[in-house]
Image: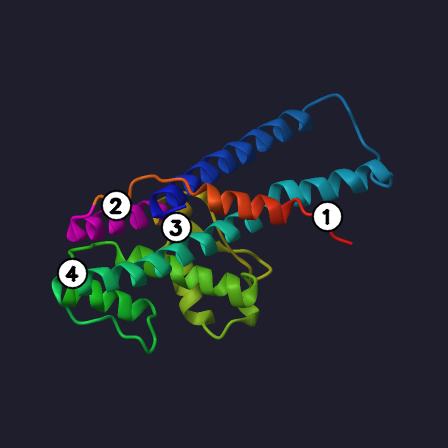
């Protein structure tokens, strides 16, 4: 599966998930005004409370966390690998091999490739959020960058910090991040002038994974 396929798959994931969240929230709102009632001390009440906690809070938060990590990982991986192709094709300076982090990626594509990409701030916000999720499970109390994270939540309307110091973001934040990644690689592919990034399917990899995934283990 190449970059185009993975981005399209992420789009499908995102759309399906957001529809599911909206649908469940709508059904819950309808249920609140139904004639049914549940005793506070009953097992049914406990089950209902846990179900709501997972379906309306923990579930959406964690799925969006996974999507953010997946999206940024794809951006970083392909930004670095494609930089080598560009440098080889145009005999340009290679991206720094020591760090290959976000500042180096931005520096390479802006100064070496002269790519006029205007949404670096959007990708940097995604990077900051991704790092908090990966290293602190989204909680500011376990992060060394609390000040910058609070500042980000104040300037980015689609991000907020809950009362338990957990950073969360809505579907609009992921959508704008996904759009920025698409726009970035459109410019990169234009620079490469290469059409080898169309959809292809590798059945060898599919068979390898299915064989492993369905194997009976003791």
Magenta-drawn stretch, dominant element (helix, strand or loop): helix
The magenta-colored residue range is 178-194
Q: CA distance from mark 1 to mark 3?
A: 48 Å
Q: Position of residue 138 (x, y in %)?
A: 54, 61
* Residue at image location 62% in from the left, 29% down from the top: 29
Q: Nearer the viewer, residue 144 or 131?
A: 131
Badge 1 density bin: few <14, some 14–19, many ≥20, Cα 10 Å: few
Decide which of tag 1 and tag 3 comes sooner along the chain: 3
User: Could you say which is closer to the camera, residue 66 or residue 197?
Assistant: 197
Looking at the image, residue 117 sits to the left or right of residue 97; the answer is left
Per the rendering, the mark at residue 89 is 4
Secondary structure under tag 2 reads loop
C-beta proximity under 8 Å, tags 1 and 3 = no
Q: Quadrant of the C terminus?
A: bottom right
- Can you give x and y, in whole percent of width and height, for residue 204 in the image? 48, 45
Return the residue nearer the eye: 183 or 60: 183
- Which of the labelled discs sits on residue 216, or is there none? 1
Label 1 close to label 4 by CB (< 8 Å): no
Report if residue 135 is visible in the image.
yes
Taking 35 as reference, is 167 left or right?
left
Spatial separation of the CA atoms under disc 2 and disc 1: 38 Å
Q: Which mark is residue 28?
A: none
Say which residue label 3 marks: 157
**Which residue is label 2 attached to?**
196
Please tell me whether mark 2 or mark 3 is closer to you in this view.
2
In the image, residue 157 above or below residue 130 = above
């Amino acid at each position: 599966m190449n970059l185009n396929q993975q981005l399209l798959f992420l789009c499908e994931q995102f759309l399906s998930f957001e529809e599911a969240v909206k649908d469940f929230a709508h059904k819950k709102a309808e249920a609140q005004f139904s004639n049914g009632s549940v005793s506070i001390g009953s097992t049914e009440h406990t089950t209902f409370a846990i179900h709501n906690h997972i379906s309306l809070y923990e579930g959406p938060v964690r799925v969006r966390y996974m999507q953010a990590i997946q999206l940024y990982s794809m951006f970083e991986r392909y930004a670095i690998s494609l930089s080598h192709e560009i440098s080889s094709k145009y005999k340009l300076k290679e991206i720094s091999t020591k760090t290959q982090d976000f500042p180096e990626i931005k520096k390479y594509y802006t100064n070496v490739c002269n790519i006029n990409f205007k949404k670096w701030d959007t990708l940097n916000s995604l990077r900051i959020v991704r790092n908090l999720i990966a290293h602190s499970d989204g909680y500011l109390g376990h992060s060394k960058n609390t000040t910058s994270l609070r500042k980000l939540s104040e300037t980015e309307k689609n991000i907020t910090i809950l009362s338990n110091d957990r950073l969360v973001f809505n579907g609009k934040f992921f959508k704008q991040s996904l759009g920025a990644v698409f726009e970035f690689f459109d410019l990169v592919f234009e620079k490469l002038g290469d059409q080898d990034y169309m959809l292809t399917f590798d059945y060898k990899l599919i068979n390898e994974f299915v064989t492993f995934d369905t194997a009976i283990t003791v």
